[in-house]
Amino acid sequence: MAITVEHLNAWYDRKQALYDINLSIPPLSITAMIGPSGCGKSTFVRCLNRMHEEIPDARVEGKVLVEGVNIYARSIKPRYVRQHIGMVFQQPNPLPTRSIFENVAMGPRINGLARGSSLQELVEQSLQQAALWDEVKDQLQAPATQLSGGQQQRLCIARALANQPKVLLMDEPSSALDPISTLQIEELISELKQTYTIIIVTHNMQQAGRVADRTVFFLLGRIVEEGETTALFSHPQKKETEEYVSGRFG
Amino acid sequence: MSTTLHPFERNTANAFQPPPSALLIRRHISNALLIMLSTFFALFAVGVLFYLILYILRQGIPYLNLDFFTKPPAPNGEPGGGMGPAVQGTLILVGLAALLGVPLGLFTAIYLAEFGRGRLANAVRFIVDLLNGVPTIIFGLFAWVLIVVPQQTFSSLSGGVALGIIMIPIVARTSEDVLRLVPRELREASLALGATETRTILRVVLPAARGGIITGIVLAMARVAGETAPLLMTAFGSTFWNTDITQPMDALPLRIFNFTLSPYQVQINQAYAGSFVLILLILLASFAVRWFTGGFKRKF
């Protein structure tokens, strides 16, 4: 298993957001987190790279084992966790003050992965992996904000990949994009699965159906059901899952 | 005219043109009155300011020449001379003030916006606001006790310290506001790549807030450039060229203050020219601010 979560609980100040989460995620697969707003799916993925604790007064308990290592162990620093577990956010968030190149080069620079010509290679390779290279190769020094929303999101994916992570977390990566950009991102995700373990949060059940190998259904901070995507959608075991995937609430 | 008609049976073509009634007429009149009054007072306020600037312009410009910037004041009552040392002194004093006020103000802002939480932060914020309201002569007194008395001489260093302390709360509060405006998403982008908090603040948050921070600094500098009271007991003033910061130094507001009280018409005229230069300095700073804030708004 690439990721094993054991007895994970999470809080925002006094309000508990996740209750005793136990889950295993196989390597080189796409796992979708679905559920209605406020069910804890975003909180859950933010716990997987220790971003949850960046929110004031937020707290986590439990274990998250990534390739056997508990990322919440006392000896582990959050910044190394975040280098190896990349994240793409709901809103494309390239740095507005920096160029396209500089945005992708950020991670390698922060973590000292490459410099000079090897950095340039790494940036090119990451942009190619994110299917953006052909569109931006002639304007690498242009400000990142010149790109369209879909391009910006692929730039953010390239930026995450440049850190050479093992796992890629995506928090509703296409919810702010138009249908064509969404399609491009989905194709890209399916492509990236060969190299990375991907976890994607989505409020869009069709999207989960299209891209995910496995799907996890969250409700009120608990996992209600998880399994193969096709099985979960066609033969849900629990009543709540059936009602949600058939569109009766959420 | 009947007042008992059903709303739908009004004797008008449509509901947007109700018939004139006493109430409606009263509303129209009070509406027009309020518009007239507020416009009048707004124009009056702006007019006073405009008259002031025009007056200083008219009184000052004729006496503005190259000598004004290059020569020290002439001996009392004699024609010629200028305010060279005062112009230079103001620049040096504001520079010294910025050296002290900008780092302290900026670090206070970073503390308040990024780290500060709970009681200590609230206390710091309250004290910074308090400092903002303290009469500036108090800061002059403070610098006098702290530097002038032990050194046994007035000095531009003490003046710079007094002005610098005045700058701290202005820089701190304007910068804090701008730092808070930097979207959470940008911080998260940096943190999620493995950047430390320090690196995120220095490389991502500060550059994103650059325009607004510069605006705050320039405004604070313009503000202290016109301060007179704290300089009376620190920089003191001088009629000679001086770049030694341990010695008394002239400043535009001080020279204006001295010359305005002078019995000699030459010096009074030069005081007007000095006032004009001071206003011009602050006007230029405001234009610079406009330019920077424009750049800031474009980014978000």
Image (cartoon, helix red, strand yellow):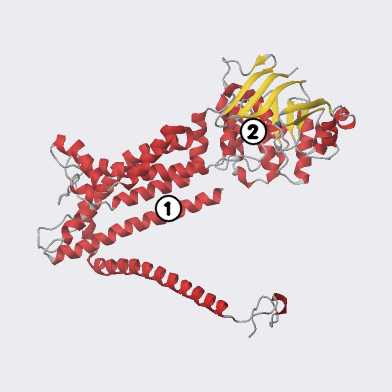
* Residue that numbered label 2 is attached to: A159
Which amino acid type is shown beneath numbered disc 2?
Answer: Arg
Q: Are marks 1 and 2 in contact (CB under 8 Å)?
A: no
User: Which chain letter goes with mark 2?
Assistant: A
**Is residue B229 visible from the viewing direction of this image?**
yes
Left or right: residue A133 versus residue B159 is right
Which residue bears the numbered disc 1? B289
Given residues B286 and A49, the one toward you in this image is A49
Vertical relation: A237 (above or below) B28: above
Looking at the picture, which amino acid does disc 1 mark? Answer: Val
Camera-side mark, 1 or 2: 1
Q: Chain of mark 1?
A: B
Residue B77, picture quadrant = bottom left
Please state the horizontal and vertical placement of residue B189, each as a whole percent of the image. 60, 34
Q: Badge 2 local density, few (<14 within 10 Å), some, or many (20+)?
A: many
Name the secondary structure under disc 2. Answer: helix
- Residue at position x 60%, y 15% from top? A73
In the displayed structure, would residue B91 be above or below residue A155?
below
- Residue in front for this viewpoint, A219 or B192: A219
Asked if residue A51 shows in the view, the reply is no
